[in-house]
Image (tube, rainbow, N blue to C red):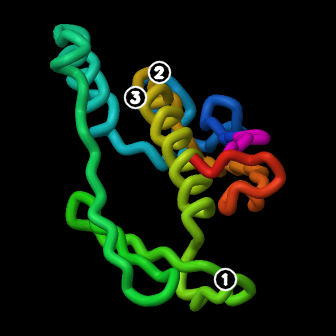
Amino acid sequence: MSTRIIHAIATALLGAMAAPAAATGENGRAQTMSLIDANQKPAVEKSLRELASMSPTEAATTNKAVVTLVANQHSIAVTRGFNVGQDEPQSVAGGATGPTPTDLFMAALGTCQNVVLVRYAALEELPIEALETTVTGVWDRRGLYGLGGEDPR
């Protein structure tokens, strides 16, 4: 089964580019509201220092999810103690109780993009007033069943 990611667009309103605020901070910069708190920059810098001293083997990490079928096409995944529900729409005999796996895949790509943008903005001390990432993907559903020459692997 092949998946093509059509686009991932992040739109951020950076404080430095937004309309000037009325107040000026201690550093002489215009103060703006930011979704990034002061703890982000030191945490990112610490992570960078640690990672820079590691070998690829030391820096490798493993993520794990345990996925349990609840009923029909509805599953619950547990990862790092968080429960994530998944289901299929009623149009394909699902219960429509949650997002589909492809919905979760798109959401994972978008949230990953937001994390990366926040980390770089924190390093540059750029406030983010708003951030929205849109991820769109197109896939051939025939690949689920090996139809139309699509390989389901």
**Residue drawn at point x = 43 percent, y = 76 percent:** 85
Closer to the camera: disc 3 or disc 2?
Answer: 2
Identify the amino acid type marked 3: Glu
Count of marks overlaid on the render? 3
3 or 1: tag closer to the N-terminus: 3
**Residue drawn at point x = 49 percent, y = 29 percent:** 121
Which residue is label 1 attached to?
A: 89
Camera-side residue of 67 and 103:
67
Q: Is label 3 in contact with label 2 (beta carbons under 8 Å)?
A: no
Closer to the camera: disc 2 or disc 1?
Answer: 1
Q: Which residues are magenta?
A: 1-8
Circle 2 SS class:
loop
3 or 2: tag closer to the N-terminus: 3
> x, y (%) of residue 8?
70, 40
Q: Is residue 135 left or right of residue 25?
A: right
Which of the numbered marks, if any, corresponds to residue 124? 2
Identify the amino acid type marked 2: Glu
Q: Is label 3 in contact with label 1 (beta carbons under 8 Å)?
A: no
The residues bearing labels 3 and 1 have C-alpha atoms spaced at a distance of: 53 Å
Check if residue 2 falls in the magenta segment. Answer: yes
Which of the numbered marks, if any, corresponds to residue 26? 3
2 or 1: tag closer to the N-terminus: 1
Identify the amino acid type marked 1: Pro
